[in-house]
């Protein structure tokens, strides 16, 4: 939770102001800092968009109190929306592909939401279509649609980025963050590029993901175990703007798995696969800067640890690589 010094009236008021912590394994002269989003009440970065988007939709009249919000989600967004919806007099329904974390789905239901599963092989595109079909069947219902809603980007431009800026006194040289919807990276990129156009912006994806197609590369689509980032269908990722990105860093599942274990054992970070992939990529960028291969306006590299590993223990994140990927 956020470091509130006074009592607050709602759990929504504890969202944001999460710690920014140095990654010990980064070069001394080019530190990597990670934003620890598991400190939010729903334990992930998606609490931010849950609160911000629903409040804006109510303000604009897209939803009225007592209405229903329906979202296609792999899990954390559902939890974030469910946390906020419960405090804003809204009902929540989530359309979730079956393969995603059972723990997340249990938490969504515990927060009062309904969860509708769709076949994993149909992908997120099918879940998106199903969510819109459900919204059309109900009165006073809307789909925030995190994959295409500009409020997703705005959330991070208006909340996450200023927190980082304040913590580092504006001295951010590179931003290295994984892309699922792309909202987090785009929001931070817009904010920091406006202040320092030479800020180096790197998107992170698992090996087998298709984000590099945005840069005109041919990609062999393959299954990957890393959750929360990457895509197999760039047509569903409306928020990603390749003009704001200098590079896309691809991280194999094996390196991600090794970094999950290292972060826990050596640095006390109980984080999941997207955090580990972000850390691998951020350390790689920091090492390139340290060797003089990249010219950046400031030495600090910023990444994000979106959630904790506790929601993925049933998937064997701390077992052997073979057990995790089986």
Image (cartoon, helix red, strand yellow):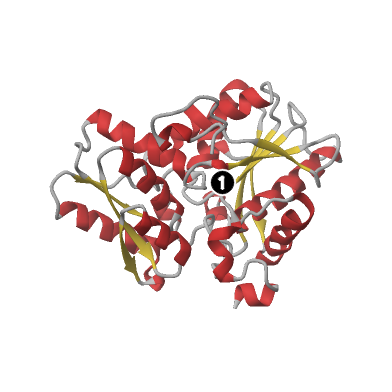
Q: Is residue 267 above or below residue 303?
A: below
Total marks drawn?
A: 1
Say whether residue 133 is left or right of residue 224: left
State the quadrant of the C terminus.
bottom right
State the quadrant of the N terminus.
top right
Across and down, in percent, residue 300 comes to 74, 32
Where is residue 122, by image quadrant?
bottom left
Q: Is residue 263 visible from the viewing direction of this image?
A: yes
Across and down, in percent, residue 6 comes to 50, 24
Q: Nearer the viewer, residue 213 or 56?
A: 56
Task: From the image, tell me which residue sits under label 1.
Answer: 38
Where is residue 120, by image quadrant?
bottom left
Across and down, in percent, residue 306 comes to 56, 47
Q: Is residue 222 visible from the viewing direction of this image?
A: no
Mark 1 crowdedness (10 Å alpha carbons): few <14, some 14-19, many ≥20 = many
Q: Is residue 88 above or below residue 253?
A: above
Q: Residue at x 51, y 38 (%)?
A: 186
Q: Is residue 5 above or below residue 110?
A: above
Say whether residue 83 is left or right of residue 197: left
Q: Residue at x 47, y 47 (%)?
A: 42
Across and down, in percent, residue 204 comes to 61, 50
Mark 1, secondary structure of its residue: helix
Q: Nearer the viewer, residue 323 or 205?
A: 323
Q: Residue at x 51, y 47 (%)?
A: 44
Q: Residue at x 41, y 51 (%)?
A: 79
């Amino acid at each position: 939770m956020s470091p509130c010094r006074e009592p607050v009236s709602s759990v929504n008021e504890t969202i944001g102001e999460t710690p920014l912590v140095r990654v010990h394994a980064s070069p001394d002269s080019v530190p990597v800092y990670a934003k620890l989003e598991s400190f939010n009440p729903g334990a992930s970065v998606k609490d931010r968009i849950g609160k911000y988007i629903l409040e804006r939709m109510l303000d604009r009249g897209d939803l009225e109190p007592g209405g229903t919000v329906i979202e296609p989600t792999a899990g954390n967004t559902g939890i974030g929306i469910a946390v906020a919806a419960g405090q804003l007099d809204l009902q929540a329904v989530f359309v979730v592909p079956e393969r995603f974390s059972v723990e997340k789905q249990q938490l969504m239901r515990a927060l009062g939401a309904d969860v509708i599963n769709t076949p994993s092989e149909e992908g997120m595109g099918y879940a998106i279509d199903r969510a819109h079909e459900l919204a059309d069947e109900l009165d006073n219902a809307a789909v925030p649609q995190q994959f295409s809603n500009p409020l997703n980007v705005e959330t991070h431009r208006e909340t996450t980025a200023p927190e980082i800026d304040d913590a580092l006194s504006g001295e951010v040289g590179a931003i290295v963050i994984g892309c699922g919807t792309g909202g987090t990276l785009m929001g931070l990129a817009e904010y920091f590029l406006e202040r320092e156009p030479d800020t180096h912006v790197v998107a992170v994806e698992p090996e087998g993901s298709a984000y590099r197609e945005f840069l005109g590369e041919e990609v062999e689509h393959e299954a990957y175990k890393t959750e929360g980032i990457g895509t197999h269908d760039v047509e569903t990722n409306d928020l990603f703007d390749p003009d704001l990105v200098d590079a896309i860093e691809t991280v194999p599942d094996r390196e991600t798995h090794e970094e999950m274990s290292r972060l826990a054992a050596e640095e006390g970070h109980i984080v999941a696969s997207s955090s580990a992939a972000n850390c691998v990529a951020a350390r790689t960028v920091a090492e390139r800067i340290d060797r003089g291969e990249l010219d950046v306006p400031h030495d600090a590299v910023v990444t994000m640890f979106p959630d904790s590993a506790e929601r993925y223990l049933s998937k064997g994140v701390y077992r052997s690589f073979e057990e995790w990927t089986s």
